[in-house]
Each structure stands twice: as C-alpha cells, then as structure tokens.
Image (cartoon, rainbow, N blue to C red):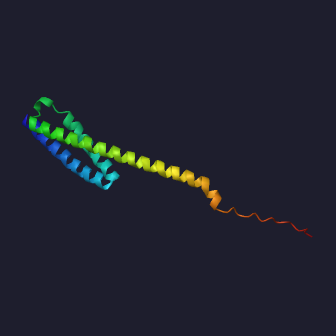
C-alpha cells in the first residue's frame, strides 16, 4: 500500500503541476502548449486510474477531486473561448460576403480597349 500511495502522490503532484502550466497557457492563448501539456498528462491520468481505488486514501482522493474540478473548469473556459472565436469567424465571414456584394459598385470596371486591326499589307 505504501508503494501505491507514494506512486499516486507523485502522479497527482505531476498532474497538479501540469494543470498549473495549462492554466497559464490557457490564459495566454498558447494553444500549442496547451495541447502538448494535455498530451503529457494523458499517461499520468491512465496510470493513476489503473491504481486500486481501495488503496488511495482520503487526502489523495481530495487532491484528485480538486485536480479534476480544475480540469473541468479549464475545459469550460476553453469551450467558451472556442465559441467566441467561432462567433468572430462567422462575423468576419458575413462581412466578407457583404463586401463582395457591394465592392462592384465602388470599384470601376476596367475599360476594354477596342482595337481595330488595320489592314495589313
């Protein structure tokens, strides 16, 4: 049991550290870093989940619960930001379509030069 407790303590400490880095990346819009940190956390989560729950004491359960709540909050924040970006992209797309409709009225069409071929020869 001591080995499991020690392993779980190290795993949750590493996950807490990654969560702190994720929060910073999210706050600064460092999306590549955020994805990288999430990928680094995956094997730790899998290893933690593979441990016998009976051997995890209440203090570790509390830390795991707090980490999970933080992760869920970060996911909600990320969803909000994704929604905001989507809305902005839709606004830009609508502006682009409006511009495409009105631009012909403001940009003169090039005059076509009529060239008459003079008799050669």
Q: In this view, does 78 lie above or below 99?
A: above
The x and y percentages for residue 106 are 63, 61
Residue at 35% across / 48% down in the picture?
81
Q: Which residue lies furthest to the left in this view?
A: 2
Residue at 80% across / 64% down in the picture?
114
Q: Is residue 54 above or below residue 11?
A: above
Q: Is residue 64 above or below residue 114?
A: above
Q: Residue furthest top?
A: 54
The x and y percentages for residue 111 are 73, 64
Q: Observer-nearest residue: 47 or 61?
A: 61
Q: Quadrant of residue 11?
A: top left
Q: Is residue 20 above or below residue 63?
A: below
Q: Quadrant of the C terminus?
A: bottom right
The x and y percentages for residue 66 are 17, 41
The x and y percentages for residue 10 are 14, 44
Q: Observer-nearest residue: 93 or 25?
A: 93
Horizontal placement of 37 versus 52: left or right? right
Residue at 61% across / 55% down in the picture?
102
Horizontal placement of 110 versus 56: left or right? right
**How many marks overall?**
0
Horizontal placement of 20 versus 96: left or right? left
Residue 84 visible (yes or no): yes
Q: Quadrant of residue 117?
A: bottom right
Residue 3 visible (yes or no): no
Q: Residue furthest right?
A: 121
Q: Quadrant of residue 2?
A: top left
Residue at 70% across / 63% down in the picture?
110
Q: Quadrant of the N terminus?
A: top left
């Amino acid at each position: 049991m001591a080995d499991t407790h020690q392993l779980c303590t190290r795993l949750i400490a590493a996950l807490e550290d990654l969560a702190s880095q994720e929060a910073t990346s999210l706050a600064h819009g460092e999306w590549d870093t955020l994805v990288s940190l999430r990928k680094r956390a995956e094997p730790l989560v899998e290893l933690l989940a593979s441990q016998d729950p009976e051997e995890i004491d209440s203090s570790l359960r509390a830390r795991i619960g707090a980490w999970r709540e933080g992760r869920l909050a970060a996911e909600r924040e990320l969803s909000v930001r994704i929604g905001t970006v989507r809305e902005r992209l839709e606004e830009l797309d609508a502006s682009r379509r409006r511009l495409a409709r009105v631009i012909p009225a403001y940009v003169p069409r090039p005059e076509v030069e009529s060239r008459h071929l003079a008799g050669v020869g």
